[in-house]
Image (spheres, rainbow, N blue to C red):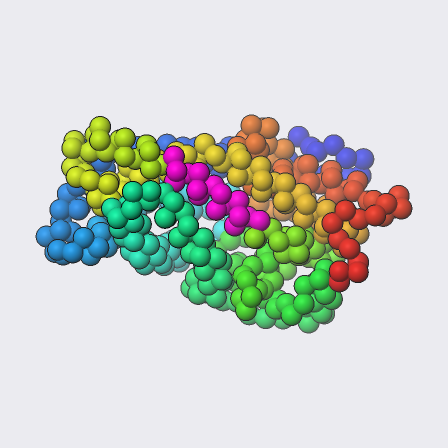
Amino acid sequence: MRIVSEDPRFVVHVTAEMIRHSRILDMLYFGGFVYGIVELLLLLALGISARLRDAAARVAKRPYLVAVLYVILFTLITAVLDFPLSYYAGYAVPHQFDLSNQTFTAWLVDEGKELMIGLVFSAIIIPLALFGIRRFKRWWLVLSVASIPLGILLVVIVPVVVDPVFNDFIPLRDQVLKQKLLDEASRAGIEGSRVYEVDKSKQTKTMNAYVTGLGPTKRIVMWNTLLAKLNHDEVLAVMGHEMGQYVLIHLWKGLAAGIIGTFFVLFVAQRVYEWGLRRWGPRWGAREPGDPSSLPWLLLIVSVISFLGAPIENGISRYMEHQSDMFGLELTHSNEAMATSFIKFAEDSKVNPSPHPFIEFWRYSHPSLSRRIQFVLHYKPWAEGKANELWRAEAG
């Protein structure tokens, strides 16, 4: 199977291995959702959640501390229950398709770090959310508003606090490429950029690059795998896309969309949550709204609503990613370099560049690589004397 192209340089050679890998990833996406829902239902129906709350209450008396201890116990229990799926998705599959050289011990260490970071954040945020549910009648509104500064804070601190726990970020060592990237960023209207490379090769053989952070944490980041596999023209083309996301304020637009989505999700969640507690709460041992033992029910509701809303979220994301492709091409005019980089992304990550339309619609945050390749090969408004749609030279 091949993507149709008149030039063999722009053909993705799709193998049976790529098809099989993509199908496994799709299965993990949909199957993982079902697995998580069943897990939460069992924690409620078997009374495990209530027993965790009672165990926490025997140690602490204040409701907030009970909630903190419950969250710790709940997080550890779910980590154990999730481990088989996490192992298969995070370790077995990448090794099955030769996408990682990471040892099991190193993978386990990373999983442990992720668990501890998640535990710290959860033990702070979730008890506060449960307090809000107990304290306020319209708690959906209070939690939605509180999520705004929290989301912004996470965007600021994750690049400098969380990411370095897993990898080393160092200034880009290729000085020639670094200067080209800084010049490109300046033309894009991004001043004062810091360019980093990260040692992702210790975890994966796949490639990625991104612009992240806000204010003092703003940075351009490239995986060392990308630097090893793409030539300079391809790197500059890919980073033109990433710079487009920054200039077009996709981060802020994404946060705004997330805030609107959070308001909707929590508005619906409050009604379903309180209805469910009235109907099944006594059976589950959940005494009132905000009872820590009701957390699985709340998470289940939010998970279902978020899952059903995934096509909307991903559709917005695909639109913004398409805009970034347009911006990158208008900035660089590197159509062929961007096309060959996408071909390398597809073949390197061993994914089907032409997924079923339903799969792309439901779970793809980027347009399929086949669509992107065809687009970047033909989008050349400057060749027809037309004005750019997104990048303005005077903005640089």
**Residue 378 in which image quadrant:** top right
Q: At 27% from the left edge and 30% from the top edge, which residue is drawn? A: 275
343 in the magenta segment: no
> Is 126 placed left or right of 193 in the picture?
left
Residue 260 in sight in this render: yes
Q: Magenta region's main secondary structure?
A: helix
Residue 310 in the image: x percent, y percent? 49, 36
**Side (left or right) of 299 relative to 186:** left
**Residue 329 or 386: which is nearer the viewer?**
386
Which span of residues is magenta-colored? 253-268
Q: Where is residue 361? Give x, y as percent.
A: 57, 32
Q: Residue at x 54, y 69 (%)?
A: 216
Task: Pick the residue in front: 97 or 299.
Answer: 299
Quadrant in the picture for the C terminus: bottom right
Q: Is residue 262 rendered magenta in the image?
A: yes
Quarter of the picture containing the N terminus is top right
In this view of the protein, can residue 337 be seen by the observer?
A: no
Q: Is residue 203 above or below residue 95?
A: below
Image quarter of residue 318:
top right
Residue 326 as seen in the image, left or right of residue 204: right
Residue depicted at 68% across the width and 36% down the height: 371
**Residue 27, relative to residue 145: is it above or below?**
above
Residue displayed at 60% across by 51% down: 250
Relative to 274, is 258 above or below?
below
Q: Name the spot of residue 97 as percent of width and height, x first.
A: 51, 43
Q: Please identify the quarter of the rendering in which residue 105 is found.
A: bottom left
